[in-house]
Image: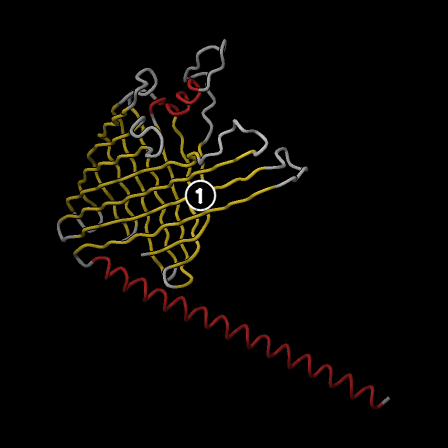
Amino acid sequence: MRKIVLAIVALLAMNVTVAQTLEELKAEKASKKDSISAIQGRVDAIQGKIDAIPGWKKGAFGTIGASLSGFNNWYSKGAPNSSAGNVGITANAFANLNQPKYFWRNSLNINLGWVKIDDKDIDTDDDSFRSATDVFNITSLYGQKLSDKFAISTLGEYRTTIIDNFNDPGYLDLGVGATWTPIADLVVVIHPLNYNFVFSSEDTVFESSLGAKIVADYTRKLGKVNFKTNLSMFQSYKSADYSNWTWTNSFGYTLWKGIGLGFEFGLRNNRQEALSYAIDNLDVGDPTPTFDSIDNDLQTYWLFGLNYSF
């Protein structure tokens, strides 16, 4: 009986010791987190001062994603003898000039993708790579500073496709207004006077118009992580049918010597493009689509793959 009591006492003592040790470790972990947060705060403050130094700041990172597959006598799929491939490339680059009285910010975003599906049992099918994603966007923003956070600005933005139908359609925004830079990495552009030039062979669908332009861009490099998000909106004063917006997001994580993993996704809403697609894919005998009759579905794309940072 005495041995049993001693064993129970020993177990209780061990539990108390483990509990104390666990609480001590949790307290030490919390203090370390506080220290890391304080260090990161000091690093961010130093980075802010570096970003505020006059001169050019340049950078670029991109992602390559690819997959290939082949099937022979794989009867569970619709095409048992087939091969498929998917290749995608994205590139994000910027060159920003910061001076005491003005700034000039330039950015480029490219996303290109190709896909192929070859059914070996059908000799007449298309076994070549076809474009899947096709995005080209270049932006230039000039601002004359009124203060550290506000400036009178002018913006030029051009976006189109480059694999298929270059500049058909193509969009060119030119406008003036104000730019707000609350922090070093965030730029918010509000231009109430902006003209959206639309270039296209389909004059009955695409139309240029006057409107307001809003752009929000946040680009940041934090250690091994590259991050960029950009929202570009045009609100037509003529008709909501001519308005559009595009939101792209790019992430890159460096693992070794600039090589890492990357992910990009984008969203877009454009009624003119939706109507053009509906007309191009109209079945014989169907009524001609209009802005009121089409389903203006949200456009999306994404890419995951290897990333390289310059």
**Which residue is more in the foreground, 277 or 269?**
277
Q: Kindly identify which residue carries mark 1.
A: 87
**Which residue is more in the foreground, 72 or 235?**
72
Q: Quadrant of the C terminus?
A: bottom left
**Which residue is more in the foreground, 48 or 146?**
48
Residue farthest right in this picture: 1
Label 1 Cα crowd, 10 Å radius (few <14 / some 14-19 / many 20+):
many
Q: At label 1, which amino acid type do we have?
A: Val
Q: Residue at x 18, y 44 (%)?
A: 151
Where's residue 58, x and y in %? Answer: 24, 54
Taking 204 as reference, is 297 left or right? Answer: right
Instruction: From this view, report whether residue 80 is shown above or below residue 21.
Output: above
Residue farthest left in this picture: 101
Where's residue 90, x and y in %? Answer: 37, 45
Residue farthest front in this picture: 123
Where's residue 211, x and y in %? Answer: 27, 27
Q: Quadrant of the N terminus?
A: bottom right
Instruction: From this view, report whether residue 273 is shown above or below residue 267.
Output: above
Res. 38 image quadrant: bottom left
Query: How are the colours assigned in the image?
Result: secondary structure
Taking 66 as reference, is 246 left or right? Answer: left
Taking 27 as reference, is 256 left or right? Answer: left
Where's residue 16, x and y in %? Answer: 66, 80
